[in-house]
Amino acid sequence: MIAGGGMRLNASERAELIARYRDGYRAFMDALEGLSEEELDHAPDGEWTPREIAHHLADAEMIGAERIRRLLSEPDAQIQGYDEKAFAHLAMRRPIEPSLIALQGARETTVQILERMTDDDWKRAGTHSERGRYTVEDWLTVYASHAHDHAEQVRRVRGRV
């Protein structure tokens, strides 16, 4: 993450991060491809299961979609942190398909916003309850890699059941 919003990205860097953000859903779906039900519920070395990760990504993306909208529409938006681990435990062996739809929808609708942002939009910031100053660029930097990072986590489960 960009510490305290101190760094400014240029247009090319933002475009690369937006492309990575857009690709996150595909990367995560590729990682899930062919996993058995048993693998979906396997947690190596105390990590989250792929099922928990799928639900976590849906939660995070829905929250992230709201965060970017607040940053862009509210002066000094107040961004509330949340307990990711507590949310992940709500997975309770639920089917992942609705969460994957939520992940895809949140990402696709947010990409539409990101691609239409003005230079002034990219300068917007608010305050995160846990991190302090939180810019639109901070948001993009975090969320651009989020699904990719979790896709790699799912890949580590393959064949370890």
Image: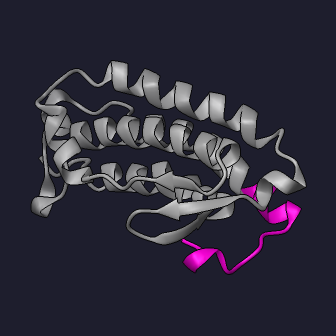
Specify start and end residues of the magenta stretch as a single range.
Answer: 1-16
In the picture provided, is 131 more to the left or to the right than 95? right
Look at the image and say whether residue 26 sits in the magenta stretch.
Answer: no
The x and y percentages for residue 49 are 19, 45
Q: Quadrant of the N terminus?
A: bottom right
Residue 47's place in the image compared with 113, above or below, is below
In the orientation shown, which residue stands out farthest toward the front?
Answer: 75
144 vs 40, nearest the viewer: 144
In the picture provided, is 61 more to the left or to the right than 41? right
Q: Residue at x 40, y 63 (%)?
A: 129
Question: Which color scheme is applied?
Answer: one colour
Q: Residue at x 47, y 48 (%)?
A: 147
Q: Can I make out residue 49 in this image?
A: no
The x and y percentages for residue 105 are 54, 24
Q: Name which quarter of the figure residue 136 lies in.
A: bottom right
19 vs 107, nearest the viewer: 107
The x and y percentages for residue 57 are 38, 41
* Tally of numbered discs: 0
29 vs 83, nearest the viewer: 83
The x and y percentages for residue 144 are 59, 54
Q: Can I make out residue 26 in this image?
A: yes
Q: Residue at x 55, y 44 (%)?
A: 24
In the picture provided, is 93 more to the left or to the right than 113? left
Q: Name which quarter of the figure residue 99 lies in.
A: top left
Q: Residue at x 40, y 43 (%)?
A: 60
